Image (tube, coloured by chain):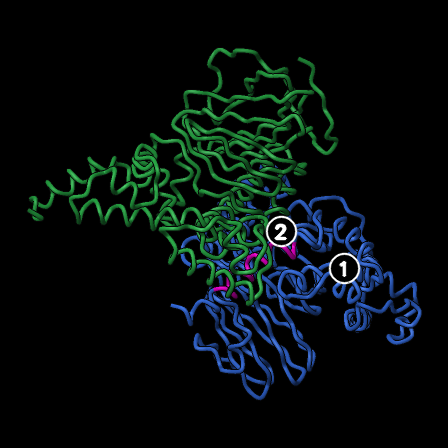
Amino acid sequence: MNIRIEAAQAGEIALSPVLPSSLQPLQIPDTIGYGAAGPYGHVLMQQMEGEGITAIYHSLYFTQGDQVIYRSDEPAIRLQIILRNSYHYESMHLGKGILHERGISLNYVPLVNASLKIRPGETYSHFSVYYQKEHLLTLQSSFPTLIPFLAKICVEQPALFGENYTIADAAILSVVDNILGCTYSGHVRELYIHYLCTELLLLSLVRMTSNTPSSGTIGEEDAYRIYKAKELLLQDMGSSISLSSLAEETGLSIYKLNHGFKAIYGIGAAEFLHESRMKMAHQALSETDTTIGIVARASGYSHPHAFALAFKKYFGYTPAFVQRSSRAAFFISSFIVFLIPFS
Amino acid sequence: MPIHSTTPTLRGAILRPLLPEPSGTTAFPDVRELQSSGCFSSLLFYDDQCPDFCIRLSNYFLGADAGWFEKSSGDRLLVLQFVLHDCLYYKLGDHERRSMSEGQFNFFGAPSISKINWFDAANSHADTLDIHFSPAHLKQLADDYPEFTRWIAKRESSSELSATPASVTPIMLRMLHAIIDCSYTGELRRTYMQSKTAALLLLALEQLIHHPSRESTTIPLRKYDLEKLYEAREFLLHNIENPPTLKQLAHKIGMNEFKLKKGYKQVFGTTIFGDFNKVRMEEAKNYLLGTDKSIADISMLAGYDDPPNFIRAFKHYFGLAPNQFRKQYLTANGNMRS
């Protein structure tokens, strides 16, 4: 995808395939990165190819409030999943709208021309997957609502799939994680990304067409209060911060707080905290040498047994299993290091 | 034969009574029936059929006695098999009996399906998930895994892709659960399964080819233990003529037998006996090719009391009996020695 970016205040932002040194630590291995950094902040796009499917992980950070315009002359059938912050956009073809964290949109535009309102000092990130028409054609028998959407694509009319605001569930987010964390290279990587992006489209379509009752809408300001509450929750997952103190800190009522979590994440504050704890625990166990007892305490469980039960219920396997499989990998890598003086 | 169903998580199950001697209808990947004989019954819950692959979840139930279960068909077998519960003993072709335990997997190939699964009386029931692939579908990946291509090209032999089964990783286990719990139907199910199985296959190949022989039960070893193991190997290689028993070796270096055995394999990739045997065989080869000594003498020198035992071991290691080996080498080199 050939995407040009321009900001109202910062002017034309020239993306370079050679990443500025400040962005290099952010680069995901084996992706094609395009980035720019300056006194205004930074823009980073990381592209992955998957046999006809292109996926781009976007991230933006601006020190000053600004209006960023994305342009491309190519048509795009894209699935967008917002990973961080609220996207307040205005598209030439699709009109105005707002997508909060975890919001999903499947749309078609004959050419890209959309502006995004940027708040100062906030990081924005989203994941876009560009599909070909053929990928949707094979699915239209399962999703009849794809037929009018495809009809519009055929006559190059902009189109937005689905009427309801859709929130990504845990399954969708875990596929995104797998794509971003893919450790393959070369052709296998392309195949793997292709399969995962196909699955992502499928799961998203199921989610968008299922009749889940809408959890209500939320205004932009309230959304930022919820993000603040989220930060507070995530800062210390070991302690159990009460809903009332969270409400006090963010200036929302308990009702609005819970309601806001539901509107953005599709789950209440307590469930959100549980989900975050479980994911954190999984990561700690698979990537570090931390003992289960310590991970349990860090996730707010005073007893490892209770933690193990909750973990198993959430993931379907025990914390010890994660630890064992990562230990085996860790042992091999540490052993190689140890071998060098001998060889 | 009565069929017991104990797994409530499966939807859309096609339950069919197992046929005694079916009329050769078993053709992959459209299998619907399994042959069975023995004192247990087996269930097949679903059989997702796509042109490229077929997924089957099997539950094996066992009666009071040990039993066996045989699959056979005229078609080529290419299957990725995961053991989901308990332990599976199997026999592939004319190989000896092997086993895979819960959480392990391997890729099997055989010119015609001839795989026997055994069950010990202690096993109450075992579950496996099998994904049968068509050779054409596997070819798509062939370019990326040369080892795999070579292995597939060996159409005539029955073998496992990796000598030791690999263990599932958390991400693979999540995919397996997603496949088992999938509630989609029709075209949607097929598309979903296609991308899931393909991604799972890639992950499996990565484990089987690039991280082989990783035993599920690796024991933690500290730096101190590693030094001990190097010491053990050193000692062993210096005492080939008078080999220590495992017990003596364990005493010598100060490590318990279990840890020595397990750790040795984990670190050096071979067993103590394997290493010892390798040195003995190389030594015998040198005598055989470098001297005029008789086979009986060489067998003594290599530490065998009984020449036939030596000949058998030599043949097993080099593929040729010692005298044939000597003859072949000498003709190839134009009898340079004399």
Identify which residue is drawn at 20% across, 36% down. Answer: B323
Quadrant where the C terminus of chain A sits is bottom left
**Residue A311 falls inside the magenta stretch:** no
- For residue B179, what is the image quadrant? top right
In the rendered structure, which segment of residues is drawn in magenta?
Answer: A322-335
| Colour representing chain A | blue
Left or right: where does residue B334 sit relative to residue B12?
left
- For residue A109, what is the image quadrant? bottom right
Which numbered disc covers residue B170? 2
The local crowd at label 2, few if under 14, some if 14 to 19, many if 20 or more residues have their Cα within 10 Å, is: many
Q: Nearer the viewer, residue B42 or A125?
A: B42
| Colour representing chain B | green
- Horizontal and vertical percent for residue A235? 77, 73
Q: Nearer the viewer, mark 1 or mark 2?
A: 2
| Secondary structure state at the residue bearing disc 2 | helix
- Horizontal and vertical percent for residue A135? 51, 46
Left or right: where does residue B141 sit relative to residue A10?
left
| In this view, A273 is above or below B286 | below
Left or right: where does residue B113 sit relative to residue A10?
left
| In this view, A15 is above or below B60 | below
**Residue A327 falls inside the magenta stretch:** yes
